[in-house]
Image: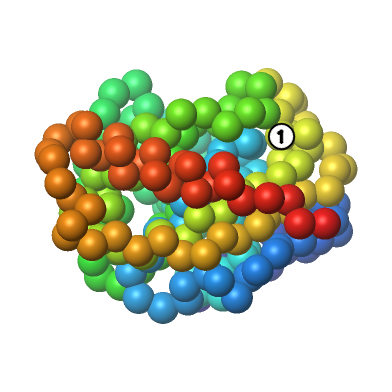
Amino acid sequence: MGAVYSVGYNLSKLLAYGYFSFRVVHRERIIESGGALLAMNHQSFLDPPLAGICCRRQIHYLARRSLLKWPILGPIFPKLNVIPVDQERADMSALKAVIRLVKAGNCTVIFPEGSRTPDGTLQPAQPGLGLVIARTLAPIVPMRIFGAYEAFARGSKYPKPHPITIVVGEPLYFTETDLAGSGRDLYQSLSQRVMDRIAAIEYER
């Protein structure tokens, strides 16, 4: 890991375990080498770093472009492997960056819902993940986060101490036979298959 990433990784672990009683269930299911995608529901700003500390290797993140304008943290985000994405439109440049990274053997976290849940419930999948799957056929590790909405819901100013758990599902593998069809309908279908797998993950206490 790079120096800045390593510092962020270890600080995130300290905060997660000390403040949120963080736990990971079935960590052994995470693919730790080669191109792969971690697909997780999106509850709060806490989700990317928490997904990251589930892995032993350095990973990449998609984040809305406006976050790079934050004071102090904004200039650091690119060194933490953040890929800026414009949520106001279909940002193909960000998806192409993910495709290049995955094909080069890297791992990226993607939130199929596209943005944080407004009410804590799972939202429909967006087609972006499906596009990446169609172009890479990379293995997908479905993950579901519990408790992050209660800890730091959309609109909250500060996070509050609340237990957070990530449960890792069995990896999902796609083949050429899964690519019947084309365009947005195909991408939407692939994304929703992953979202359905995430929805099926249960909270294991």
Q: Residue at x 60, y 75 (%)?
A: 28
Q: In the image, residue 94 lies at what x, y percent?
A: 28, 43
Q: Which residue is mark 1?
A: 149
In the rendered image, which quarter is residue 53 located in?
A: bottom right
> Can residue 71 be seen in this snapshot?
no
176 vs 46, nearest the viewer? 176
Foreground pick, 187 / 35: 187
Closer-to-camera residue (156/116): 116
Could you tell me which residue is drawn at 83 percent across and 48 percent down?
163
Q: Residue at x 61, y 22 (%)?
A: 118
Q: Position of residue 184 (x, y in %)?
A: 20, 32
- 14, above or below 135, in the image: below
The color scheme shown is rainbow
Where residue 142 appears, as percent x and y from the top left, is 50, 55
Q: Name above or below for residue 41 compared with residue 133.
A: above
| Picture quarter with the C terminus | bottom right
Closer to the camera in the image, 90 or 167:
167
Would you say 78 lies left or right of 116 here? left
**Dividing the picture into quarters, in which one does residue 95 lie?**
top left
Q: Residues within 10 Å of mark 1 (few under 14, many from 20)?
A: many
Residue 155 appears left or right of 104: right
Q: Residue 8, percent across and down?
A: 61, 61
The quadrant in which residue 174 appears is bottom left
Say left or right for 114 vs 170.
Answer: left
- The secondary structure type at the circle numbered 1 is helix
User: Is residue 139 shown left or right of residue 176?
Assistant: right
- The type of residue carrying mark 1 is Tyr
Residue at point 46%, 42% (across, down): 195
> Can residue 53 be seen at all in this image of the molecule?
yes
